[in-house]
Image (tube, rainbow, N blue to C red):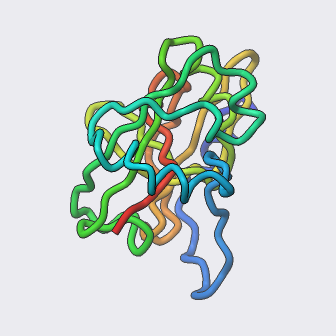
């Protein structure tokens, strides 16, 4: 067997659940904290509930520097599967972003790391946390895990092109 196949099998194989209270990776900073309150209060976000432009100056500086245009943001509804309890549940929503063009979307995906939450699509849209990243030449594969899925990762390795949204906020 090849090393990549062995690596994937070791990642996908079920593991015992983590003990309660064990620290899990959290999403990284996608929005500059010093500007977030001002952004939410000025009505820009509140008044445009679908496909609003997220001002680049609100992004963490390393992200804003690589984008050619303001990314889009949209509310994401949640299906009651229980897989992301307690951080994202049916009573809440999430805000997802995507690049204004294919090149910018690729740049956003390049910044994804372990612990970030994203939405990918194989057949249905799935919102889970990145558990690990598999490097393979010029591309990367993402292994996802629902926070409440008892350590059992999603059964597919997700390609960069299958990432549709990057979750930047959960709302309740």
Q: Residue at x 48, y 61 (%)?
A: 152
As rendered, which of 138 and 71 lies closer to the eye?
71
| Residue 135 percent location from the top left of the image | 73, 30
Left or right: residue 102 compared with residue 6 = left
Quarter residue 137 falls in:
top right
| Residue 92 percent location from the top left of the image | 30, 65
Q: Quadrant of the N terminus?
A: top right
Q: Residue at x 42, y 42 (%)?
A: 96
Looking at the image, the residue that sits furthest to the bottom is 20
Left or right: residue 58 compared with residue 62 = left
Q: Is residue 15 above or below residue 131?
A: below
Q: Is residue 59 above or below residue 23?
A: above
| Residue 121 percent location from the top left of the image | 36, 32
As rendered, which of 43 and 105 lies closer to the eye?
43
Q: Residue at x 34, y 69 (%)?
A: 172
Q: Residue at x 40, y 48 (%)?
A: 95
Quarter residue 22 falls in:
bottom right
As rendered, which of 116 and 149 lies closer to the eye?
116
Left or right: residue 62 compared with residue 88 = right
| Residue 124 percent location from the top left of the image | 26, 37
As rendered, which of 29 and 87 lies closer to the eye?
29
């Amino acid at each position: 067997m090849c090393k990549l196949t062995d690596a994937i099998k070791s990642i996908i194989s079920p593991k015992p659940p983590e003990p309660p209270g064990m620290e899990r990776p959290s999403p990284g900073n996608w929005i500059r904290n010093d500007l977030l309150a001002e952004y939410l209060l000025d009505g820009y976000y509140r008044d445009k509930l679908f496909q609003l432009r997220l001002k680049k100056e609100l992004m963490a500086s390393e992200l804003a520097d690589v984008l050619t245009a303001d990314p889009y943001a949209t509310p994401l509804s949640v299906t009651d599967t229980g897989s992301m309890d307690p951080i994202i549940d049916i009573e809440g929503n999430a805000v997802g972003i995507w690049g204004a063009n294919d090149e910018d979307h690729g740049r956003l995906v390049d910044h994804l790391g372990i612990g970030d939450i994203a939405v990918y699509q194989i057949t249905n849209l799935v919102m889970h946390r990145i558990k690990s990243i598999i490097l393979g030449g010029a591309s990367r594969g993402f292994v996802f895990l629902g926070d409440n899925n008892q350590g059992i990762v999603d059964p597919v390795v997700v390609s960069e092109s299958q990432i549709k949204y990057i979750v930047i906020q959960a709302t309740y």
